Image (tube, rainbow, N blue to C red):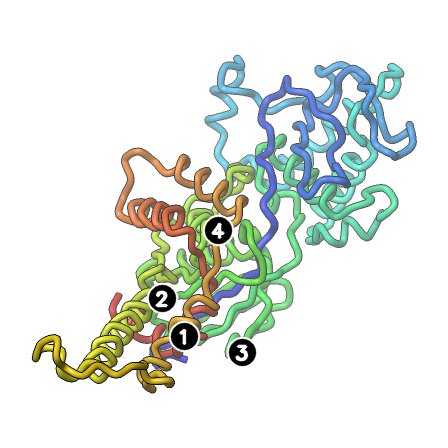
Amino acid sequence: MPNISTVRLRSRSLRPRSPIDESLGESHGTVLDEGASSVARPPQISSLVRSASSTTSNASATNSVTADTSVLPTVPSSDHPSASAASSQSDNERNQPSAVIAQIEEIFEAVIVAVEQGTQLSLPLPAVIRILEIAHEALLTGKLVTKRNIFYQDKQLFRDQRTVDALVDNIALTLGVGRHALNIAAAGKGLVAGPISLTLDDDGSILPCDDATLIPTPDRLRHVEWSRAQWILVIEKEGKGYPDLCTRRFLFSLHQSRPYIPVYGLVDYDPYGIRILRNYQRGSANLQHERDCTVSTIHWLGIRLADIRSYHVGIQEDIADSTSQTQASTHPHSSQGQDSQIPDTLPSQPSSRTRSAVSRQSAFEANTASLSNRDRKVALETLRSLPANENDEDGHYLGELQVMLMLNVKAEIQAVDNLGDITTWLDSKLCME
C-alpha cells in the first residue's frame, strides 16, 4: 500500500430505493411489492389511517385496518399553526429518549381509540405497532437493536427485511427524529483499517483497526484514538447504490474529531460512483431527516477517465510509432520515386512493439464497458440534481458525467489495478493532492 499513513473505509452499498413520499394526502398500495425489484414508496405513518383500500397484501385481513386520517398524530408542516413552535425545538430535545418515548405512547393511545371505534387501517398496522413496541422497549432499557434483529423477531409478520427497513425509516421521518433516536440501527457492513483505535461505549473495550475491522454503530463509539493518519480514504465497493447510514455516520464522526485531515473518495467510474460521492457529501433524498451523516469536504480522488485514458494515450502513440516504422521498413526507397522496388507482400508477423500496443489496447477494452440504460438514467438524474451555482467539485461531476454519456464508457476501480499497479497509482495520486 502507499507509504503515507491512512485510514481506509470500505463499505457495501445498499440498493437504491425510491425516496419516501412526504405528502400526507397521496395514497399508495402495499408497502412492499414482492414482484418488483425495488421497495414501493411507503406513506407516512400519519397517513396510514385512511379509508379502506381494495388493494391489500397477501396477509390476512387482520393485518389491514382503515380509519380516519386524524387518528394518528402528525409532524406539523410549515403552514400548520404549531409549525413555528415545532421548528424552534432543537434537534437535541427532539431526539431525547423521553421525548421519543412520549411520541410513541401517543401513537399507541391513538391506535387504541381507533380500534375501540371499530375503524380499520389500510397499511399492515401490526408491523408498524410491532416496530414501535420494540423501539419503545429499547429506549426504556437503553439497549440498541438492529433492523435485522427486528425482522427475525417476527419473520412471519414482516415477511421481508425490506419491509422493516422502509417502516423504520418512515417512523423516524414521521416522528421527526433520526433512526438512532429510536435505538434502532442497521447491522454494520462497512470496514475500517488504519492507524487508529476505537473505544466502545458499552464496555470500554478498545478496538484496534490495524486490520480490516467491522465498523461499530456510532452510538457505541466513545472515543477515537488517532496515531499517525494523514488522510481518510473512502473506498466504495461491494454493490451499487447508497452507502449505509452506519458507515456515513462513522465517517462523520472521524471527520468531526479531526476536521483538518482531508477525506478522499475512491469509487467506480460510472454514474453510480458519482452518486455515491454526492451521497456522502449531501446525504440521500429519502433520509433527509437523518443528521450527522454528511461530509461536505470529501474530495473525489478517482477513478476518472483520465486515470485509464492516460495509459490509453500511450497505446495510441505506440501504435502510431509502430505503424510508421513498419511503413519505413516495407517502403525503404519510397522517397526515390516510382522506380523504387516495393515488396510484393507485407511482413507476415507484426513487430514486438506493435504486439505490445495491441495487447495493451485489448487490456483497456477488456476493463471498460458500455453504459446500460439504467446507467444513463442515473446519469441524467444526477445531472438534473446538480445545483445551478455549482462549485468546483460539482463542475467535475458535471464534466465527467457528460463524457460518460458521450463516449458511452464506464469502468470499475479494478480497471486501474488491471492496467497497472493500483498501489503505485494511489500513492502518486495522494502525493499530488
Which residue in the protein does label 3 denote? Answer: 211
**Which one is earlier in the sequence, the residue at label 1 or at label 3?**
3
In the foreground, 5 or 84: 5
Residue at x-position 41% and y-position 65%: 233
Under circle 4, the secondary element is loop
User: Quarter holding the C terminus?
Assistant: bottom left
Nearer the observer, disc 2 or disc 3?
A: 2
Name the amino acid, label 2: Ile
Residue at x-position 41% and y-position 36%: 385
Q: Answer whether residue 152 is visible to the viewer in this image.
A: yes
Under circle 3, the secondary element is loop
Name the amino acid, label 4: Leu
Q: Specify whether 5 is left or right of 412.
A: left
Can you tell which mark lies on residue 371? 4
Q: Is residue 268 above or below residue 25?
A: below
Which residue in the protein does label 2 denote? Answer: 308
Can you tell which mark lies on residue 218? none
**Which one is earlier in the sequence, the residue at label 2 or at label 4?**
2
Residue at x-position 34% and y-position 50%: 403
Q: Position of residue 260 (x, y in %)?
A: 31, 61
Outermost residue, front side:
339
Q: Position of residue 119 (x, y in %)?
A: 85, 16
